[in-house]
Amino acid sequence: MKTCLYICLSVLAFSCKTSKTISEGEANLNLSTKQLIKENTKQKPNFKTLAARVKIDIVEKNKEKSYTVNIRLQKDEKILLLSTPISVVKALITPEKFSFYNKLDNTYFEGDYSYLSDLLGTELDFQKIQNLLLGEALYNLRDDSYKMYVDNQTYVLQPKKQRELFELFLLLESTYFKVKSQQISQSSTSRHLQIDYLSHQDVDKQILPERIKIIAVEENEEMQIHLEYKGVSLNEALRFPFKIPSDYKEIEL
């Protein structure tokens, strides 16, 4: 069952047959915090739909598993995940709920984001998952006051006042002002989530992630998810077929 969830959680980066990997150019390290957040906001991708194929490697307890998944995304509305080459597992993510079904054992799940949140150690909802997919900050940078400094040609942002339940840190690269890393730590529960955007690419004049590394730590246990997309297209007419068969058995997570 964890395998199904890992597949659904792991689609978090983009790479395209018509894309071009972006290399960092001349850095602009003289921005104020307000200007930096404004420049980051300008780079938010603007499209209606996205389709992609992603290679996923999951490492946990010294064991590695690999998958290939297709993703279809209608911005701000729904995300459909399909295992390949045969759609054995299908998952649909909407602002209201998270659902999936598995043809191998005729089971399905339909519910809120609590289990996914627990698995990665931070509160998730549709918007945060979409932000991860698009390489955006999990939390809207305009909703808080931040302090900023420069380290090794990279902007480092952190809230002036950290939240009670967790601490948040972000690294922004200094050429296109995209997120390089975002880290959420919960010292009370010994949890740490780190999302590193290892490279970005230009897809139809949109700057999107190319390779992502996710590290989720809880006490002495660590899970790593490595993602590399093999194909992506924007603004195509897409279908989102998803219907749980009536004879499937519901599972509880």
Image (cartoon, grey):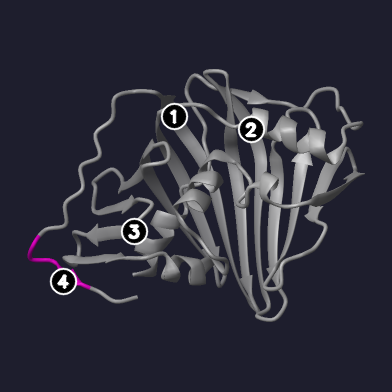
- Front position in the image: 55 or 12: 12
Instruction: Identify the element where label 2 is drawn.
Output: strand
- Front position in the image: 246 or 219: 246
N-terminal label among 1 and 3: 3
Q: Is residue 177 visible?
A: no
- In this rendering, which labeled residue sits more in front, label 3 or label 2? 3
Instruction: Identify the element where label 4 is drawn.
Output: strand
**Residue 55: x, y in percent?**
46, 44
N-terminal label among 3 and 2: 3
Q: Are marks 4 and 3 in contact (CB under 8 Å)?
A: no
Q: Which mark is residue 249?
A: 4
Mark 1: which amino acid?
Val
Q: CA distance from mark 1 to mark 2?
A: 13 Å
Q: CA distance from mark 3 to mark 2?
A: 29 Å
Whether 8 is drawn above or below 26: the answer is: below
Q: Residue at x 49, y 45 (%)?
A: 130
Residue beneath disc 1: 232
Mark 4: which amino acid?
Lys
Mark 3: which amino acid?
Lys
N-terminal label among 4 and 3: 3
Q: Which mark is residue 3?
A: none
**Residue 170: x, y in percent?**
74, 50
Mark 4 closeness class: few <14, some 14–19, many ≥20 residues within 10 Å: some
Q: Quadrant of the N terminus?
A: bottom left
Residue beneath disc 2: 200
**Residue 142: x, y in percent?**
68, 44
Residue beneath disc 3: 97
N-terminal label among 2 and 4: 2
Q: Which residues are magenta?
A: 246-250
